[in-house]
Amino acid sequence: MMRSLRLVLALLIAIVSPAAYAQQPAPQVAFTFDDLPAHGPLPPGEFRPDPIRSIIKTLKTQHMPPVYGFVNGFRTAEYPYQTELLRNWTASGNPLGSHTWSHPALDQTSAKKYIANIAGNEPLLREVDPHGDWHWFRYPYLEEGNTRAKRVAVRDYLTAHGYKTAEVTIDFEDYLWNEPYARCRAKHDAAAVASLETSYLDVAGEYVGVFRTLSQQLYGHDIPYVLLLHVGAFDAHMLPRLIALFRSQGFEFVTLQKAESDPAYAFDPNIGYPSGGTLQELTSSIRKVNFPDNTKPYKELDSMCR
Ligand SMILES: [Zn+2]
């Protein structure tokens, strides 16, 4: 009885709304955060634990799936109390991954030193997340090797040690807003803070569009995206509105593992790529596809509240 009822309903829906069957599946995105346990300057009255605790709270109240946070352990050597923030992250059900020990730029260092820096982050990750799936690696500055030899050396090490690369497929350089936010708050300039809020969401929206366009050009459809964010004070401040922006475009939120199970992530561009870039940027370079037009208010952000 239930089955035939369902069939009748399905037929009715198909007759009333044939477009429903032609619709694309909802786009998907995995949010990720870099630079745990500390990123960027803080506005007056905020303390180091505040952004991470705020982010954890928002992820919970917004019912987000587990969200990866990528760790630079060197901060905990300087400020041991910050280890507790990493424990707060895992205790809230969110996993940790590695972002190297001290955030070196692969373009500026040798593969050998870089690999030692990755290995140096492991004792801390083992300590704070003994049972977690922390063998996910996010390259600082998205620099995967300015030469092919460096790229291959680091990737070979990662593979041999059970790491998967936490690729990025949407990046709007969210971190650019954290410094002007701290300056504008220090000057009690509410109008400037409001304009930062507007430009952050405008640029995020523009770049979601840019990366969706690029995805259409490269793959013919939306891939499940991986969004790069940082644990800065302004990121924490804007997170509820950023999640709402993705919701307004019909996005579903998925884990990093789920997003990267898509075949697009199995492709290795296998090129030296100076200054780093997202997976689609490297892939588009191989396939001779131009990056869509885009703008970012670098000068305006840099000059605000000086
Ligand atoms: Zn970083």
Image: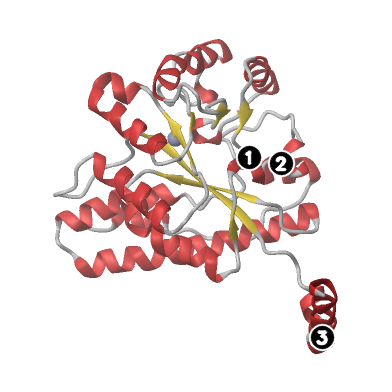
| Above or below for 55 versus 80 | below
Q: Nearer the viewer, residue 114 or 247?
A: 247
Query: The C terminus is located in which quarter?
Result: bottom left
Q: For residue 272, what is the image quadrant?
A: top right
| Residue at image mark 2 | 261
Local secondary structure at mark 1: helix
User: How many residues crowd mark 2 within 10 Å: few (<14), some (14–19), many (20+)?
Assistant: few
Kind of residue sitting beneath label 1: Gln
Does 198 sit above or below residue 129? Answer: below
Name the residue carrying label 3.
Answer: 12
Which residue is located at x 23 percent, y 70 percent? 191
Determine whether the beta carbon of the residue marked 2 sits less than 8 angstroms from the nearest atom of ligand 1: no
Say few, some or many: other residues with alpha carbon within 10 Å of mark 3 (under 14 / 14 to 19 / 20 or more): few
x and y, in percent, of residue 178 in the image: 32, 50
Inspect the image, locate mark 3, and give the three-letter code of the amino acid beneath it. Answer: Leu
| Residue at figure coordinates x 61%, y 38% from the top left | 167
Task: Give the mark toward the camera: 2 or 3.
Answer: 3
Q: Quadrant of the N terminus?
A: bottom right
* Circle 1 residue: 257
**Mark number displayed over residue 42:** none
Which quarter is ligand 1 in? top left
Contact (CB < 8 A) between labels 3 and 1? no
Give me the C-alpha separation between circle 2 and circle 1.
Answer: 6 Å
- Mark 1: give few (<14), some (14-19) or many (20+) Cα within 10 Å: some
Badge 2 amino acid: Ser
Label 2 and label 3: CA atoms lie apart by: 35 Å
Judge whether 7 appears above or below 83 on screen. below
Q: Are marks 2 and 1 in contact (CB under 8 Å)?
A: yes
At horizontal 36% and vertical 32% (from top left) the residue drawn is 86
